[in-house]
Image (cartoon, rainbow, N blue to C red):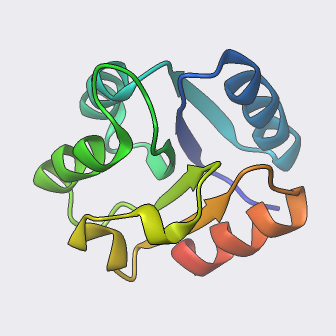
Amino acid sequence: MRTGTVLIIDDEEPVREVTAHMFTLFGMKALTACDGVEGLEIFRQHQADITFILLDLTMPRMNGEETLRDIRALSTDVPVILISGYNRTTLTSPLASSTTVAFLQKPFTIATLIDQIDAVTG
């Protein structure tokens, strides 16, 4: 069973709710944020507790790549799974090629999510 806390940053409320529920079924605690600005604030408050971050690429106010850059300024080693309806070729940030960053295309299954969690936290 997976343990720890995941921070879910996604502007789509249904995605946040369903994904948070999935993680609680895994035995994890889920924190949610509606955009990068809120996600960074939550990360600052709970950084020591966060096991990994699920981060949407396309959001208002602060997109996923900008959020990833600011997260990396605070922590270089927290694992991040980038999620998007677009494919990985849309990523422009060199931070996205880190070994602690994975990519998952929406829609995704529980099995592919678990694979990516294991890849970045293993």
Instruction: Indicate whether 22 appears above or below 86.
Output: above
Relative to 26, is 10 on the left or the right? left
Q: Percent position (x, y) of residue 16?
A: 67, 26
Q: Residue at x 56, y 43 (%)?
A: 6
Q: Residue at x 35, y 32 (%)?
A: 46
Q: Percent position (x, y) of residue 8?
A: 55, 36
Relative to 121, is 36 on the left or the right? left
Q: Residue at x 20, y 56 (%)?
A: 72
Q: Percent position (x, y) of residue 84?
A: 58, 50
Indicate the quadrant where residue 97 lies. bottom left
Relative to 86, is 13 on the left or the right? right
Q: Percent position (x, y) of residue 111?
A: 88, 66
Q: Residue at x 34, y 29 (%)?
A: 36
Indicate the quadrant where residue 67 lies. top left
Instruction: Indicate whether 28 appears above or below 37.
Output: below
Q: Quadrant of the N terminus?
A: bottom right
Instruction: Indicate whether 49 appears above or below 21.
Output: below
Q: Quadrant of the C terminus?
A: bottom right
Relative to 71, is 99 on the left or the right? right
**Badge count:** 0
